[in-house]
Amino acid sequence: MSPAVVLRSKFVTPGSSTFNNYINYMDREDAKQHVKIGSSPDKENGFDVFYNFMDYMDDDEKQGELFTSSKDKLSDKEKEKVKEQFQLAQQNESPMWQDVISFDNEWLAKQGLYNPYTNTVDETKMRSIVSETMHVMLKAEGMQQSAIWTASLHYNTDNIHVHVATVEPYPTRERMKVLDKDSNTWHEEYRAKRKPKTLDKMKSKVANMILERTNERNKIDELLRGTIRYKKENNISLSSFRKTDKLFIEAMNRLPDDRKQWRYGYQSTNEARPYIDEITEIYLEQFHPEEINELKTKLDEEVDVMKEMYGEESEYKKYKETKLDDLKKRMGNTILTEMRAIDKEERTSVFKQKVAMRQLHVLERDNQQTSFQRYNGKGNYNLQVSAIRLKQAMQKTFHDYKRERNIDEFDRLLDGY
């Protein structure tokens, strides 16, 4: 199955071998413009790749009309201004990022954006898709304020596609050393490579805007959050729940001494994680069986949609795995929060017991000293000490008697009395 949406991305930097290759691509016979290729873009009549790329995109044969983030259609004067900005960007050694978003025509028709009989596209919708996608890209790369882009919709191939070109007239990205393989020399240029996550976000934005899957994905996220929220709102204690109490203890016994590391993703919790995962499974089966079935059904639906959009070779299956892993992580941290609370309560209780014992010892010592002072030297000192010890022994014997009597009564109850 071929993908319904394809994003192809590259960049061109002045002075690189890629730049010369792209010049050759631009100078094909079927391109609109025919200009002399000079050895340097500074030469008179030289081939200015950034400037002339606008002509390529705006080719009548391709039925393309240039548009930008603020203009759906550019006048000739506006086109010249945009070209000048691209030319300035090239002079200032900015990379030019080129993105081509290509669509399967049948799939586009299925979504109601393409009429195969009239060979027309809902251009208003397509421009909106491109604008939102470019906003996502610029934000992800930190170029919202510095970059400009222009795009054009082309019909001249079997697959309707959009060309987008982006530059920074005044570059803001960091400079890095690059080896020129042809001359085997090093030179500096602005970093042009974009993060893989940025390109993934762009593809997702295109697909989501066409399919309008926002509601479906929001429902998935709500199901994920709802299971955690339910536990908190209903104050469910998994430490005292009959099916998980032993697992809870086993997990706590395997956690590191440093309570700050009691986080699900930390390596120091590896030994405890299997027990935490089992607690999560039991909790979800016990309290959210219907929600989990609904969640898995919706995830399978999204996987099918992504398979159609991105094709068999894509990583469409990872969407479901990622969401279920996210649920496991969220639940794991919620369980660890309960474990921290119990651990704190136990440590506080032991501390209070120690304080109470110290206070009791101090009180007994003070009582003994007071008794000696009341005696005021009258009689035998040793006799007074013996009397106190005898009293303590009698109290201890009485408490032991009461405890043994209670145990006997409990045993008789077990025997049927």
Image (tube, grey):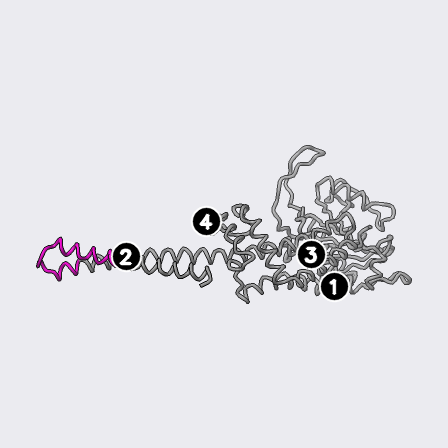
Query: Can you give x and y, in whole percent of width and height, for residue 172 in the image?
Result: 62, 51
Disc number for residue 258: 4
User: Which span of residues is magenta-colored?
Assistant: 369-394
Instruction: Point out the frontmost of discs 2 and 1.
Output: 2
Q: Can the viewer see residue 206 in this picture?
A: no
Is 392 contained in the magenta span? yes
Q: Separation of disc 2 and disc 3 at Cα? A: 91 Å
Q: Image point 20% across, 59% down: which residue?
A: 366
The amino acid at mark 4 is Asp
Q: CA distance from mark 2 to mark 1?
A: 80 Å
Q: Name the element at disc 2.
A: helix
User: Most extreme residue toward the bottom, as rendered?
Assistant: 233
Q: Amino acid at mark 3?
A: Ile
Q: Quadrant of the C terminus?
A: bottom left
Residue 215 visible to an observer of this rendering: yes
Can you give x and y, in whole percent of width and height, for residue 248 in the image? 52, 54
Q: Is residue 157 left or right of residue 50?
A: right
Q: Quadrant of residue 285?
A: bottom right
Q: Position of residue 403 (x, y in %)?
A: 35, 59
Find out whether the residues at labels 2 and 4 contact each other: C-beta distance under 8 Å.
no
Q: In this figure, which residue is indicated by the disc labeled 1? A: 212
From the viewer's perspective, tell me whether residue 204 is left or right of residue 157: left
Between residue 174 and residue 306, name the one nearer to us.
306
> What's the mark number on residue 397?
2
Q: Nearer the viewer, mark 3 or mark 1?
A: 1
